[in-house]
Each structure stands twice: as C-alpha cells, then as structure tokens.
Image: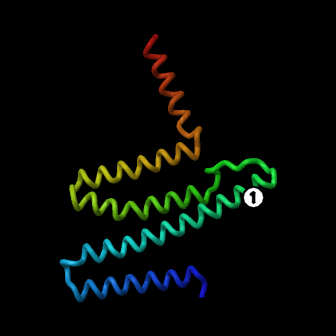
Amino acid sequence: MTGMDARDTELKRELNATLQARRELGDEYESALVDSFLEKVDQRIDGAVERRLRRQLAEQQMVVARGARSPKATDSFGERFGFGIVSLVLAVPLSAIGAGTAHLPGLLVSWVGIVGVNVVQAARTNPGLFRSWRRKSAKDEDRWED
C-alpha cells in the first residue's frame, strides 16, 4: 500500500468515525464534529502543499546549481492548478462560516475575499495579464481630457 493509499484509508476511517459519533451524540455536537474533521482535512492539505513546495524548491535549486536559467517562481501549471484547487476547497468552509454567521452579507464578504486572493495570485503569476486594461483606461482618460 502506498503512502497516498494509507492516507486515503486513514481519512476515510476518520470520516466514518465522525459520522458514527454524530449518530451517537446527536445534532448538538454536529458543528464540533464537522470542525474537527475539517481541521484534519486542512492538515492533510497543508502537508501535501508543503511537500510539493519543498520538492519544487529543491528542483529549482538543482537547476540553478547546474547553471541553467534561473526558473521563475511561478511558471508552473501545477502551482496555478494547485492554488485553484486549494482555493476552492477552502471556499466551502469559508462560505459556510460566512453564511452561517452573517447570512448573505457574510457569504458575499467571504467570496469577495476568495476572488480577491485569486486575482492577486493571477496578477502575480502573469504580470502582463491586466496591462491591457490599464492601457484602455489610460486611452479613455486621454479622450476625456481633450
């Protein structure tokens, strides 16, 4: 059994134990049980992201040590894809917390934050992404000044 299979099996056992505890303890403990399970999922995601980042850093250091071009820190599809997946995974509990505590305004605030983080990441990984918008707005300003 590989390391990933063992972690999947462990997570499935944790989920089954959480569901069983919910059946035994009732609705009043549901929130605490879900929070506990989500914390374990977050720890697992954090561990996976940390391992990937360490591996990428080691690969970049090897490339630099061999004298090849210095790789950009954000030029891999895997990093962008991973960021998107982590963002969506974290969007679920953030949405639930925002909607549960402040209803629609809380949900909107949480999604504005999620979108904001993703826009900043997109601008960081693709520096020219928003340049065309800036050029258009500058042309519009020039047209109004005439």
State the residue at coordinates (81%, 55%): 66
84 w.r.t. 37: above or below: above
Horizontal and vertical percent for residue 120? 48, 45
Q: Residue 27 is drawn in which quadrant? A: bottom left
Taking depth in this image into account, of 87 and 131 the one nearest to the observer is 87
Position of 42 compared to 126: left or right? left
Residue shown at the point (58%, 67%) measured from the top left: 51
- The outermost residue toward the top is 146
Image location of residue 49, percent across then percent down: 54, 64
Amino acid type of the residue tagged 1 in the rendering: Met
**106 or 139: which is nearer to us?**
106
Between residue 72 and residue 127, name the one nearer to us: 72
Where residue 31 sits, quadrant-wise, is bottom left
Q: Residue at x 36, y 64 (%)?
A: 92
Residue annotated with mark 1: 62
Pointer 1 local density, CA inside 10 Å: few below 14, some 14–19, many at least 20:
few
Estimate the x, y position of residue 86 in percent, counting from the top left: 47, 62
Residue at 51 percent of width and 81 percent of height? 7
Compared to residue 127, the image places residue 142 above or below, namely above
Name the element at disc 1. Answer: helix
Residue 116 horizontal side relative to residue 103, left or right:
right
